[in-house]
Image: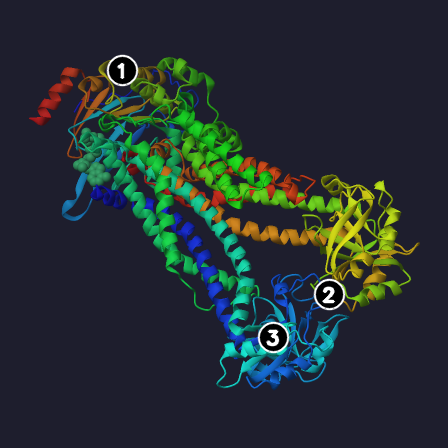
Amino acid sequence: MSSDPTPEPTRPDPRGDHAEPARAIDRPAAETVDLVRTYGDGDAVVRAVDGISLQVPRGSFVAVMGPSGSGKSTLLHCLAGLDRPTSGTVRIGGTDLDLLKDKALTVLRRDRVGFVFQAFNLVPTLTAQENILLPLKLGRRAPDAEWFDRIIDQLGLRDRLAHRPPELSGGQQQRVAVARALVTRPDIVFGDEPTGNLDRASGTELLALLRRSVDEFGQTIVMVTHDPAAAAAADRVWFLADGRVVDDVSAPTVDRVLERIRDLEG
Amino acid sequence: MWTLTWKGLLANRARFLLTGLAVVLGTGFVAGALTFGDTLEQGFEDLFTSIVGETDAVVRPAGSGASAEDGGFADGGPPQTLDPELVMDVRALDAVRVAEGEIEGMAVLIGDDGEPIGQFGPPTLAYNVFDNDELDPAELRAGRWPQVAGEIAIDAGTAGSEDWSIGDEVGVVFDGPVERAEIVGTFGVGELDNLAGASIVLLDAATAADRLGTDGRYTSIYAAAATGTDPDDLVDTLTTALGDDVEVLTAEEIADEDQAAIAPFIEIFSTVLLVFAVIALLVGGFLIFNTFTIVLAGRLKELALLRAVGAGRAQLLSAVLGEAAVVGVVGGALGAAFGLVVAFALQALLGVIGIELPGDSLVILPRTIIVSVALGAVITVLASLVPARRAVQVPPVAALTEVAVAAPAGRGILRTVAGVVLLVAGSVGMGATLFGGAGAASLGAGAVAIFLGVAALASLIARPVTSVLGWPAARAGMSGELARANAMRNPRRTAATASALMIGLALVAFVSIFSASLQATIDGAIERSFVVDAFVQAGTVGGVPQQVTDELDALTEVEVAAPVRATQLPIGDGNPTVAVMAPEDVLAVFDFEAVDGEVAGFTEGGMIVAESTADARGLSAGDTVTVGLPDGEVDVTVRAVIDGSGLDTSWFLDLDTFAANGGEATVFNLYVQFADGVGAEAGITAVETALADFPQVGVFDQAGLAEAIGAQLDQLLGVVVALLALSVLVALLGIVNTLALSVVERTREIGLLRAVGMTRSQVRSMVRKEAVTVALLGAALGLALGIPFGAAFTSVEAFNIDTFALPWLQLGIGVVVAVLAGLVAGVIPARRAARMDVLRALQSD
Ligand SMILES: Nc1ncnc2c1ncn2[C@@H]1O[C@H](COP(=O)(O)OP(=O)(O)OP(=O)(O)O)[C@@H](O)[C@H]1O
Ligand SMILES: [Mg+2]
């Protein structure tokens, strides 16, 4: 196991005065304790996540890798409050998700979590801008114009704001999804193979954007990927197998990631 | 391909269930209307046969049968009658075993609330009790037959609905003031306690002879043949014996005549029910159309795959239409069964409001089942034709691509053309009936074509209109914004769903506009022509008794009480309603300005004609017109032409000319003018007090009359709207269905919305607001169509409507009801959407 790459305390906090105790700087953005998620019962029980305890430090960019069926998506869903664990605890910014009823959990997803899926990220009836502002509108919150401008400039979406999803390319759609995930300044953004449906150029571009949002906005990101190059853009990589974290690589490079994959398979 | 059909049906069970329900509802009401009519017809046939009973021959005055055809609402001539001695002659014949004379007259029972029972509705009849029970159609149910004046027996049905029992004293009116009589018995006819709502009073023979206005003469004689005599021989014998002044009919002929007399009423009744059933079926067609469209849209990939592996378009088309046919046939068959329930419910409903109709067991003719199944199949296949054709156009390559296949271009033009053609053809069809004298079929077909045309065109305007209608919802928050966007995303679907509701609303708007315009016209006419201080109107077909006129003439407060006899007379090639009045009354009551001639000339007899009629017939003062009166044609001089606008008649004929030529007509109205110096209130009070014993007439001032007419119109409007509610119900099902299917279609999107933070209640509200938006579109289309319909109908000359009124309140209520319907329709799909599991929804495909 590599050492914990805690973010340098010297980095300016772009969140400004968001200084509630629950979001204290030393608290992890998300953490799990003995997280278990099983499917089915009796002999047919599948332990998709089998006792994972981990912490996602604030401002870090974590990639999750592992063979198909190793539990990556399940872990992400539990972390994001989309799925309820069978046992164990999930905390987002210090809030124990298990204690939240459906409504509160939904509000937490809306205000404190961002999500970028592999595909079908956008509501087809809404324009790019409306899609980006969707979580704010749902919470009847006024968008912070300056922050919004910064995001869309950063993501190069300014001239696409009035378009509807069918009029956008796959890469543009994913960028809109990233903008939507960032617009609420969430505690953490999750991505489940966000580059999975993109060609290499668009994928690389999107990764660069994610990287920049970590570096410039101090965003925390957890991203599932099968692509070693994508994983290399992260601060660290967790390797999953059979529902457990089997390895943890800091400051990954493509070669190191490939090497680990070969080790794990071998 | 049948395998494919079955698979398709099974895979979409729930969806087709709702389609099937629409078919069942639509065809069910058709089958119900048919069954109800058949049952009624059979019931009356049985009834008339049982009324005739032991009677073999009926003797009545020659020619009196014809007047029976207008249901006893004869124009008031004295009943043709038979000499009482004739019964003796009949009895004296060897061929006759027993004979009885019948006196038919009128008696109005007064309810405990002081209001006459029956009024202008069902007949209020009175008869004598026969000495010989055998021939009497009435069968005693309780008590005994009346024996002296002051005793009556009444039909058990009326006794039941009025909650009267033997020994009660009730009010009854023959031809004068109300009298008290004791109920000594109740009776029924055959198995029925009551004949289609008619109230029947039986009197002892002497009282009947005295009080029923026949001077002791009979209206008919019933005879039974002696043992061994053939009934036909009896008829021959009687015909020979009694001469030309009478006609003799067999019992069968009498029953047939009665049946023939009632047939038009049954037919009108069943036709009205059928019309509403067909409207519901038409609305159901939209629902079917929508379901097939959505289900097939969801199966495009599957169809494309089948095409890719070699299925031909025709094969797919027949598979898809096969599904429709199966749904239609099964729905139609269930509809026939449901029709029984409907017919039964209709009977029960009429029973509740006191109309007991004959026919206990429902009559189910094979025709009913065939019609129901055929209608179900035809309407379903027709409704699925367009979506099926569209679906099989899917290119095989669509199976391999990710994106949904857009509808082929160019269809918009086809649709627009079809819509415009339907709209124009429909307008021409309706116009042909309204303004050109074509039959009702052209009107109905025209209306259907217009509905279809508007539905086709509606998809073109659905997007902008929905955008406007959804604006308030969108202002209210994100769920409303999404609701509006959802309603706009598939304009065809939204338009078709809304169109179903449009039909009901258009018809409701139309009838309320029509009735409001009629009311406004009548109000205006009353206002203009109400030159009198008060108005006495008969509340029953008995008219205004002479005593009422006498009572009023005797009042010092009353200057004139002018009787008006309204009757239809043949003039030229028409048969217009003519007001027969004494000339001095006309001059005293009306303030006519002559356009031509002198109104005062009327005192010498003759006619006064309204200008519009005079123009149409090329008449001017001094001309003569030939009027058909009972004693023959008479040439009558036109004394004056007046501006008759606002009058409900175009002809005034002087009473002397009328009476001198054998004319007799019931007085239904009195115009009352108060004496100088008598205030309106004092005058009305005096009249009302004087007429307290005459509950069969009503006293109105101007406002009261307008109100009374309004109440009648409102009642009619209520019935029509209640029947139209049926189509709104089916339309509501359509919204439920479309929305439920849309929600399923959008599962993934709803999952996404939930994932990014939409709460369950926001999801619910989103779906409900979409439902309301669709309902609003339906309401808007309905009003956009109903108002011109109303305008077209009110401008038809035959209706004599001169004012076009928009009843804002009623139209507003219609819109509110539509919105509520939308809310209700949204409940189930909304709950379904809100209950979705986020993760499962996200991962669905
Ligand atoms: N809804 C479910 N019901 C039953 N089993 C499930 C369900 N979802 C996931 N599983 C099982 O849990 C295990 C982990 O699945 P998960 O989707 O988390 O894998 P993954 O690592 O994301 O795989 P991939 O790389 O293919 O996306 C698998 O064995 C899968 O079959
Ligand atoms: Mg996965």
Residue at label 3? Answer: B59
Disc 2 packing (10 Å; few <14; some 14–19; many ≥20)? many
Q: Residue at x 28, y 14 (%)?
A: A205
State which mark lies toward you, 1 or 2. 2
Q: Amino acid at mark 3?
A: Val
- Dot 3 and dot 1 within a common chain: no
**Where is residue B368 shown, x and y percent of the image?**
40, 57
Q: Quadrant of the N terminus of chain B?
A: top left
Report the Cα–Cα distance between label 3 and label 1.
104 Å
Q: Earlier in the sequence, mark 3 or mark 2?
A: 3
**Where is residue B78 shown, x and y percent of the image?**
72, 67
Q: Residue furthest left?
A: A266
- Dot 1 and dot 2 within a common chain: no
Q: Residue at x 64, y 69 (%)?
A: B62
Q: On the rendering, which quadrant does ligand 1 occupy?
A: top left
Q: Secondary structure at mark 3?
A: strand
Query: Viewer-proximal residue, B637 or A148?
Result: B637
Q: Residue at x 84, y 66 (%)?
A: B551
Q: Quadrant of residue B611?
A: top right
Residue at label 2? Answer: B696
Disc 1 packing (10 Å; few <14; some 14–19; many ≥20)? some
Q: Chain of mark 3?
A: B
Q: Amino acid at mark 2?
A: Gln
Q: Quadrant of residue A167?
A: top left
Q: Is residue A53 left or right of residue B42?
A: left
Residue at label 1? Answer: A202
